[in-house]
Amino acid sequence: MKIKGLFIVTMLLFTVLPQMVGAQVERRYIRQGNRQFEKAFADTARVDSVLLRDAEDSYRKALEEDPNNWDASFNLANAMASQGRMEEAARQYQALGAKTDVDKTKRAAAYHNLGNCLLQSENLQGAIEAYKNALRNNPNDLETKYNLAWAQDKMKQQQNENQQNQNQNKQDQDQNQQQQNQDQQQDQQQNPDQQKKDQQNQQSQDNQQQQPKQGQQQQEQDNEQMSKEDAMRILEALENDEKDVQEKVQKQKAQPQRRRTQKDW
C-alpha cells in the first residue's frame, strides 16, 4: 500500500513537460503526445493503456525528427514507466540524469523518476542513491525528500528483519544442537547394558574370526610334527634292516666251510 501511495505522489513528476509553441515538427509530436498522455489519466478509476501507447508513439516520432530532444526522451520514459516497463524507463532516466548540457531542474526530475522506478522494482539501495542525486541538483524538492526518507526507513526495517531472522536461525541451530547433545547423553545413560552387549558381541565376532586362523595354524603345526615322526620311523626302519643284513652276513662268515673230498677211484 505504501508503494502504491508513493507512486501516486511520484506521478506528479510523471507528467509531460510543456513545450514552446513553434513550427518544428518534433514539437508538434511532443504536444500531441502530451495530450494523449494527459487523457490517459483523465479517468481516475482507470488508466487508458491505449492512449499511453499512442503517447509513446508520438514521443518516438518526435525523437525521429530530433534524437537529442531531451524533453521528448523524458516524456517517453514517463510513458514507459506508466505502462509498468520500469527497467526500460530506468535506463532512459539514468541516461537523461547523466546529461550535463541541461539545467539542474531537469536532471533532478530524471533522477527523481529513476528513484521511483527502482523503488517499484524493490531496489531500495538504488532508489536511495537516485533520490540523493536528485537532491544534489534540486535540494529544495520536498517530494524527493519525502521519497528518500521513506526508502531509507524501508531499508532500515528490512535490515532489522534480516538481522532478527539471522539471530533466530542462530538460536534455532543452537537449540537443535543442544537438544541433540541431551538426547545423546540420555541414550548413553539409559542404555549402558546395550553398550556392554554391543561390546561383547563385537568381541565375540573378533574371537570367531581368530578361531579359524588359530585352528589352521594348529593343523599346520600338527602336519609338520607328523611329518617329522614319519621320517624318524622310516629312518629307524632302515637302520634296523641294515643291522639285520649285517647280522646275517656275520653269521654266514662264522659257519665252517665243508671240504669236498675227492674220491680215489
Image (cartoon, rainbow, N blue to C red):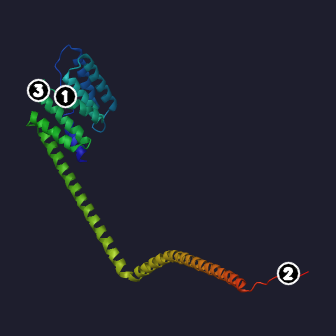
Identify whether 180 is placed above or below 59.
below
Of mark 3 and mark 2, the one earlier in the sequence is 3
Question: Crowdedness of circle 1 by 10 Å Cα count: few (<14), some, many (20+)?
Answer: many
Apparent side of residue 238 relative to residue 136 in the rendered image (left or right): right
Amino acid type at mark 1: Leu
Identify whether 146 is placed above or below 161.
above
Confirm or deny contact between disc 3 and disc 2 (CB under 8 A): no
Camera-side residue: 226 or 262?
262
Identify whether 191 is placed above or below 112.
below
Residue behind mark 3 = 103
Residue behind mark 2 = 262
Camera-side residue: 173 or 68?
173
Residue in view at x 22 percent, y 52 percent: 158
Residue in view at x 10 percent, y 33 percent: 137
Residue 77 seen in render: yes
Amino acid type at mark 3: Asp
Camera-side residue: 59 or 265?
265
The percent coordinates of residue 259 (x first, y second) are 80, 83
Please identify the residue farthest to the left as the structure is shown. Answer: 140
Residue 41 seen in render: no
Secondary structure found at label 2: loop
Question: Crowdedness of circle 3 by 10 Å Cα count: few (<14), some, many (20+)?
Answer: few
Quadrant housing residue 60: top left
> Distance between the Cα atoms at labels 2 and 1?
164 Å
Amino acid type at mark 2: Gln
Secondary structure found at label 1: helix
